[in-house]
Amino acid sequence: MKFIDEARVIVKAGKGGDGCLSFRREKFIPFGGPNGGDGGDGGCVYFIGDEGLNTLVDFRFQRQYKAANGQPGMGKDRRGKSGDDLFIKVPLGTLVHDLETDEILGDVTDHGQELKIAQGGFHGLGNARFKSSVNRAPRQTSPGSPGESREMKLELKLLADVGLLGMPNAGKSTLISSISAARPKIADYPFTTMTPNIGVVSVDTARSFVMADIPGIIEGASEGAGLGLRFLKHVARTRLLLHLVDLAPLDEHDPIDDAKAIIKEVKRYSELLAEKPRWLVINKSDLVPEDELDARVEALKKGINWQGPCFVISAVSQQGLKPLLFSIMDHLDETSNICS
């Protein structure tokens, strides 16, 4: 299924049913009086979270949604049937913007969460409502009000605990495929990952976290180079970023320059994202001679002035993965306790 993370849709709530003008007409009852019923309310439009969805691709094929109108009132004081509400399924992490007012209407983050985005019209009143001691035979009714209509932009931001950052071919896809059931495309050329991937990482019994892998970032991405920075929004909700650096790049790039480029591009995208907790993960240690490994790791840390947590791993041979995963799990548990 094609991954789509932005869409524009138009929704319209149902119109309220008009009130009825009617009088009681029965044999031997000459003055039956008014008995026109009210109309029904128009249906509302809701977005509802569905954990089974992970893309907005459905909104590429259908862009307009309309709830049912309320039925008009009827004689014998019968009220019209209200229009059915319309529930539109969206993936978790969907942010809803009103394009006319430029406000955020809500954020769907939980399965089954309902977000009302368009209010149905109010029902019209039948002439029975207008009966009074001085107006025994009213011929007055009121129409149903129109339902709200909105043009909206939907933006999907994946919900994950940990996000991966790095240059193309840094080993992000290999890492997430080694520690979860996610199976992204892996090859020895840049930009094999064209869309975000998520995987559930089980550390031990009853302890797991969700990891998000996004396409690689290159220098100049903020100006449109490569795939740009649009996919960085999918790690904006994470609680921890892992900055993967290839210690032995095939194109003989300097790992220090690569690491600095990622840091610079993230800051250009968002200072808030740049301030998130970020760990350095040095990958492909199996491609470096053992007697050179420590020196090259220290040179990399010194070159980028790194002071935070650092892990040396090989995603292919799975060296160093267990300490990394348990440290991530402990960090997430600690931050959860602090937040609670």
Image (cartoon, rainbow, N blue to C red):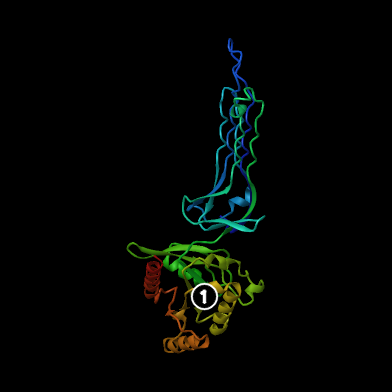
Is the C terminus in the top left, top right, bottom left or bottom right quadrant? bottom left
Residue type, label 1: Glu
| Quarter holding residue 314 | bottom left
Question: Residue 156, image x and y in percent?
Answer: 56, 59
336 or 78: nearer the eye? 78
246 or 21: nearer the eye? 21
148 or 268: nearer the eye? 148
Question: Residue 124, image x and y in percent?
Answer: 62, 34
Residue denoted by label 1: 275
Helix, strand or loop status at disc 1: loop
Question: Residue 14, image x and y in percent?
Answer: 61, 40
Residue 183 shows in this picture = no
176 or 59: nearer the eye? 59
Q: Is residue 68 above or below residue 37?
A: below
Residue 214 shows in this picture = yes
| Quarter holding residue 27 | top right
Question: Residue 181, image x and y in percent?
Answer: 43, 62
Q: Is residue 335 above or below residue 91?
A: below
Q: Is residue 119 above or below residue 94?
A: above
User: Which residue is depicted at the point 54% across and 61% down?
Assistant: 157
User: How many numbered marks are there?
Assistant: 1
User: Which residue is depicted at the point 48% across and 70% down?
Assistant: 174
User: Which residue is depicted at the point 66% across and 29% down?
Assistant: 140
In this rendering, position of residue 172 left or right of residue 37: left
Question: Residue farthest to the front?
Answer: 134
Is the N terminus in the top left, top right, bottom left or bottom right quadrant? bottom right
| Quarter holding residue 225 | bottom right
Question: Residue farthest to the left?
Answer: 205
In this rendering, position of residue 278 left or right of residue 83: left
Question: Residue farthest to the top?
Answer: 28
> Few, some or many C-alpha atoms within 10 Å of disc 1 (few <14, some 14-19, many ≥20)?
few
